[in-house]
């Protein structure tokens, strides 16, 4: 794990990994939510919007904005 961010009032933990994936986790249940999202390189930074419906992930060359509701 290289980067972490909380979303939805701490209910969801976003984890960015060295293998270039981002995985959302149900923090209370300690289980993954959906499938990992792939990046080109390791995920350096994660951030979630205040209401948690979108987040941004950044690797060495790419910034992505994701809709967390889909």
Image: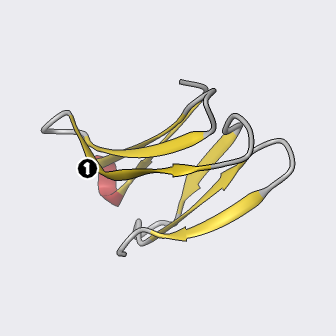
What residue does disc 1 label? 11
- Count of marks, rendered view: 1
Residue 32 x/y as whole percent = 27, 42
Q: Give the quarter of the figure containing the C terminus.
A: bottom left
Residue 24 x/y as whole percent = 37, 48
Residue 46 x/y as whole percent = 60, 47
- Residue under the point 74% across and 38% down: 41
> Which quadrant of the view contains residue 17?
top right
- Residue under the point 41% across and 72% down: 53
Left or right: residue 18 versus residue 69 is right
In the displayed structure, 18 sits above or below 52; it is above
- Residue under the point 43% across and 44% down: 23
> Which quadrant of the view contains residue 9?
bottom left
* Secondary structure of residue under mark 1: loop
* Residue 44 vs residue 18, the one in the foreground: 18
Q: Please, which residue is most extreme toward the right here? A: 61
In the displayed structure, 53 sits above or below 24; it is below
Label 1 crowd bin: few (<14), some (14–19), many (20+), radius 10 Å: few
Residue 68 x/y as whole percent = 41, 68
> Which quadrant of the view contains residue 30?
top left
In the displayed structure, 45 sits above or below 67; it is above
């Amino acid at each position: 794990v290289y980067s972490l961010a909380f979303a939805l009032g701490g209910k969801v933990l976003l984890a960015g990994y060295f293998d270039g994936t981002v995985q959302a986790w149900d923090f209370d249940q300690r289980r993954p939510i959906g499938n990992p999202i792939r990046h080109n390189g390791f995920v350096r930074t994660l951030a979630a919007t205040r209401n948690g419906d979108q987040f941004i992930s950044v690797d060495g060359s790419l910034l992505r904005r994701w809709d967390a509701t889909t």
